[in-house]
Image: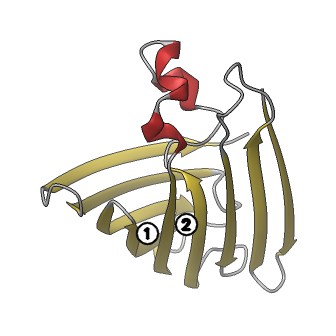
Amino acid sequence: MELGAGLSYANPSRGLDMALRMQGLAAHAADDYGAWCVSRSLRLAPGVAGRGFTMSLTPSYGPAAAGSERPWRLPDASGLAADEYAAPTRRLDAELGYGLPVHGALFTGTPVVGLGLSDAAREVRLGWRLTPAGAAVGDVSLGIEAARRESAVDLETEHRIGASLSARW
């Protein structure tokens, strides 16, 4: 059984959004098995139109695969207590962007650059997001992203290119 809690503060008029989340394993069949994680986030975002400077910073500590979605990614339940899921790691994700008017100011286009650092890897991301002007951040967006990930363990490099469409209601 996992328990989680979070606390967040948002001030849209100043473009400020802060959050603290904690999650831990409350009970497990193995007495000596335990896992917990904590993450914080700070986001500065422009006003309703989404135009201007945007920044997010998210440091976290805990198992790399922590989260309520973890059991659904595993082929069977034997991996839930595996050592690689219990080992705590540190991670820092940062992203910078700048929202610009697109197509007669009907949309906001935001070029973004991101950096992800962890005990196991380093990742650099470049991308572009398109949202309708006036839509709340995260409600609807279309994006493309390219990333380069360098593993600190086996010194392998991975390149990714992807597209995304997200809608929240």
Q: Secondary structure at mark 1?
A: loop
Left or right of 125, for residue 67: right
Residue plotted at (69% across, 59% down) = 38
* Residue that lies at the very extreme toward the left in this rendered image: 156
Front-lying residue, 3 or 57: 3
- The kind of residue tagged 1 is His
Q: Amino acid at mark 2?
A: Leu
Instruction: State the image coordinates of residue 106 (x, y, percent, origin top left).
Output: 55, 66
User: What residue sits 72% from the left and 73% below the top?
Assistant: 48
Image disc number at residue 106: 2
Above or below, comparing residue 162 to residue 79 in the picture: below
x, y (%) of residue 109?
A: 45, 70
Could you classify mark 2 by the number of other residues whose Cα lies within 10 Å: few (under 14), some (14-19), or many (20 or more)?
few
* 69 over 135 or under it: above or below: above
- Check if mark 1's residue and mark 2's residue have beta carbons within 8 Å: yes
Res 67 quadrant in image: top right
The 10 Å Cα crowd at callout 1, few under 14, some 14 to 19, many 20 or more, is few
Q: State the residue in front, 1 or 111.
A: 1
Report the residue marked by disc 1. 103
Q: Is residue 62 left or right of residue 149?
A: right
Quadrant of the image occupied by residue 28: top right
The colour scheme used here is: secondary structure
Residue 105's spot in the image, x, y percent? 53, 74
Q: Secondary structure at mark 2?
A: loop
